[in-house]
Structure formats: structure tokens, C-alpha cells
Image (cartoon, helix red, strand yellow):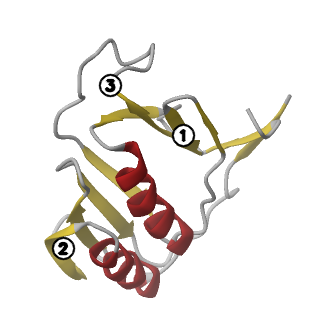
Amino acid sequence: METQELYRGRLIDHIQLVVRDLPASRVFYEAVLEVLGIPIGGTGEGFLWADELVLSTRDSPAALGALTGRHHLAFQAKDAAMVDAFHKAALAHGGRDNGAPGQRPYHPGYYAAFVLDPDGNNIEAVFHGEAERSAPSVKITF
């Protein structure tokens, strides 16, 4: 592990996606996470992680030899422009369109874009509209 600090926000501690081609997934996720201001946190043999997201190969000890299948994962964006940039970066780095940026009927102000990553996972960036947070996240230092 390269860092001794973690930032945690809401419900999820971490999500692991087991991917067919880790280098292709790295290209995709580095591009979309850079747009969202989330750096790759570290790498190891057969895996990499960024904040609460872990990507691993099927032969990593945690994967038990199986791909995870199709999942939906939504990243928070700071504004609509960040959602637009996420969609553009995803399409330029191996993603496929699964819903262009725009308003959604889920609640007022819900602005999102959806792409399929190299393994077919439905990856979303969402801006929930103008709101005030009590804190951006919780910082954990080891």
C-alpha cells in the first residue's frame, strides 16, 4: 500500500471489480477517475485501487478465479461539467455509451451520464444538484 490515508464518505467501504484485462481497465479508470479528481491509490500483483474501488484480475487471491459480472457503480461529480467530462473521457478510453449526459427523473437536479467499462459494468457519474455538505469526507490516517 502506497498511502497511509484513506477518505471515506457514505455507505460503501469498498467495491471490488474482477476484470478480464487489468491494463485495459487501468487505462479506462485512470482516465475517468482523473476527471473526477480521484487518483489511483496504489497497485499490487494483479490489482489496483482508487479510494473505495478495487480492480483485480481473476487470478488474484480475492477473486477466487471468477469475474464479478455486470455491476452498476456511480461516482459523485462536483457539477454537471464534471459529468460531461467523465462521459467524454470514458468514451475516449475504451468505454461505450450507455446514456449521454443529461437530467434524469430520479429527483430534481439529478444530472448523470452512463458508460459501460471494458468488462460491461455500468459506470455512472452523477451530480445531484446544488447542495451543502457538512464535510467532504472522513479522513482516516494509519
The residue indicated by pointer 3 is 58
On the image, the x and y values in percent for residue 122 come to 21, 53
- Quarter of the picture holding the N terminus: top right
Q: Residue at x 63, y 58 (%)?
A: 39
Query: Callout 3 environment at 10 Å: few (<14), some (14 to 19), or many (20+)?
Result: many
Please name the amino acid that badge 1 sits on.
Leu
Query: Callout 2 environment at 10 Å: few (<14), some (14 to 19), or many (20+)?
Result: few
The disc placed on residue 104 is: 2
Q: Residue at x 39, y 69 (%)?
A: 128
Q: Residue at x 19, y 64 (%)?
A: 106
| Mark nearer the N terminus (3 vs 2) | 3
Quarter of the image holding residue 27?
bottom left
Please name the amino acid that badge 3 sits on.
Arg
Which one is in front, 100 or 33? 33
| Mark nearer the N terminus (2 vs 1) | 1
**Proximity of marks 2 and 1: CB atoms separated by less than 8 Å:** no
The residue indicated by pointer 1 is 48
**Proximity of marks 3 and 1: CB atoms separated by less than 8 Å:** no
Q: Residue at x 38, y 31 (%)?
A: 57
